[in-house]
Image (tube, rainbow, N blue to C red):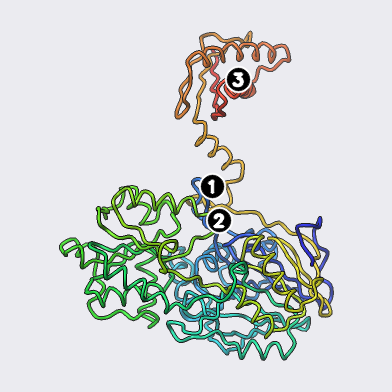
Amino acid sequence: MQSAHTKKLASPPPVPRGALRITPLGGVGEVGRNMTTFEFGGKILVLDCGVLFPEETQPGIDVILPDFSSIRHRLKDIVGIVLTHGHEDHIGGVPYLLRERPDIPVIGSELTLAFINAKLQEHKIKANTVRVEAGDTHKSGPFDLEFIAVNHSIPDGLAVAIRTPAGLVMATGDFKMDQFPLDGRLTDLRAFGRLGEEGLDLVLTDSTNAEVPGFMMSERDLAPAIDNVFATAPKRIIVSSFASHVHRIQQVLDASHRSGRKVAFVGRSMVRNMGIASELGYLNIPQGLVVDFKKLSSMPDDKVTLICTGSQGEPMAALSRMANGDHQIRLNAGDTVLLASSLIPGNENAIYGIINKLTDLGANVVHKGNAKVHVSGHASAGELVYCYNILKPKNVVPYHGESKHLQANAELAIRTGVDPERVIIARDGSTIDLVKGKATLSGQVQADLVYVDGDTVGRATEDTLKERRRLSDGGLVTVLAIVDPATNTLAEPLEYVTRGFVHDEIHLENASAEVERALAKAAAQGIDDLEKVEHVISGAVSNYLKRKSRREPVVVAIAVDA
């Protein structure tokens, strides 16, 4: 098995003549910000471009993007962006890439393009879109593309076969093998088998559920549990889901209709996406079922269903704001909250925190842990093995998952007979060269986390977050110093202003003595620049407080000439 984690990889050499280079820039070692590039003959094809949602350790961050730095100087060489489906972790980064070159063709299915076009309108970008369907072929530069139907938790999902003179590659995208899908759209295993017979040189496979044994239950099997919630809930039902989870929301609409409840969508993205899905015929809404949520205030609680975002505990999403009491919809004792999505790794603490707050408000919280109200959209181990046996790939690169998921997927491939030396566990930024039918790790390009913070992209850094975490943990101490520039001594006693730092006054008094000693030492070294003096002061106070209070507040010094 080749692993990027056990090799020290340098910058890759030029792509060998006749070779295909594959570079995951996100989604390999994490669940989210999926993006992979394919390079052949000097041209680049981008597969997906999604976002990752921040964890608790990344305060103030809206979303996290893939790192475009390795392709930024080659934007003119990009022949297309292929989107496998319409979830945020696969399309959310597209507007940011198109900001840098707006005319890159965006290729995807009807619903996927509708979702991305709505996002692009908000960014004031008019995209060059190419609509495809399962079974279609399309040529983008030197890449001959074939699109294959796959079943996922959103309609219109596609796997992609990529043909070049270097070989035949397939990327599954996110998929599973639900045999009774709500929309009747099966993963096209006949097409998988045909590709296997043709001779599949490399496959990139969804790894998210590689650790889960057996086969995933069908979406249809959730209906009894969801119906039970609607049959027994005494008051309002608030359903939280991804804003693109059309299948689950269809089940909630059907259950609401059967139980005589009216439904309102809450949250801009939810209203927008469900409007698009309904308009295109992917969501069936009975006449008069959905109303504006303001009209629900005059209805009996047991006749109300609200569908909102926030199933991952996102701070600004509707459910989180309801739990914190700062949303116009107020939760009451006896309300039922149905969390109809899975827990994305890394979000567990945020989600459980929301569940506890909802419980404290008197709500009955129904989630995957206590009822069968969600099934994953990703193939489990049994399904992956089944596919490997059909595809019979020469080389395998697990993607879409954390390290443990990639490892589990790799072991499944080997158990089905794939040569261990041709199974590659990559990481974000790994370059993989397919040469004469064999794939090898060839190098590593930059693939950092790129933070979107308000209207800025890439300006927030790890140092920024480290300081925010320090503020969160230790608070802030501001030191005002009146300094005699002639002697570099304090002209007046130091003044301290603290925010969020719990302290003993004697600590701050003793810190002043530390500052005087540090200033005397600085004067002996000829340091008299005010900016450097501020650094000396903040360093002395910070070190002292760390030693005495066992806390590390952010210390800001302001030095003023006497």
Mark 2 and mark 3 lie on one chain; the one further toward the N terminus is 2
Asked which quadrant contains residue 310, the reply is bottom left
Please name the residue that numbered disc 1 is placed on. Answer: 58
Between the residue at mark 1 and the residue at mark 2, the CA separation in whole angstroms equals 10 Å
Q: Secondary structure at mark 1?
A: loop
**Which amino acid type is shown beneath numbered disc 2?**
Ile
Mark 1 surroundings: few (<14), some (14-19) or many (≥20) residues within 10 A: some
Mark 2 surroundings: few (<14), some (14-19) or many (≥20) residues within 10 A: many
Q: Secondary structure at mark 2?
A: strand
154 and 64: which is toward the camera: 154
Query: Could you tell whether 361 is left or right of 295 in the image?
Result: right
Whether residue 494 is visible, yes or no, is: yes
Mark 1 and mark 3 lie on one chain; the one further toward the N terminus is 1
Could you tell me residue 136's position as x and y percent?
A: 58, 89
Between the residue at mark 1 and the residue at mark 3, the CA separation in whole angstroms equals 27 Å
Front tag of 1 and 2 = 1
Q: Residue at x 44, y 65 (%)?
A: 341
Q: Which mark is residue 544?
A: 3
Query: Could you tell whether 471 is left or right of 248 in the image?
Result: right
* CB atoms of marks 2 and 3 within 8 Å: no
Could you tell me residue 360's position as x and y percent?
A: 32, 48
**Which amino acid type is shown beneath numbered disc 3?**
Tyr
Q: Secondary structure at mark 3?
A: helix
51 and 117: which is toward the camera: 51
335 and 27: which is toward the camera: 335
Please name the residue that numbered disc 2 is placed on. Answer: 64
**Which amino acid type is shown beneath numbered disc 1?**
Gln
Residue 145 lies, with reference to residue 529, above or below; the image says below
* CB atoms of marks 1 and 2 within 8 Å: yes
* CB atoms of marks 1 and 3 within 8 Å: no
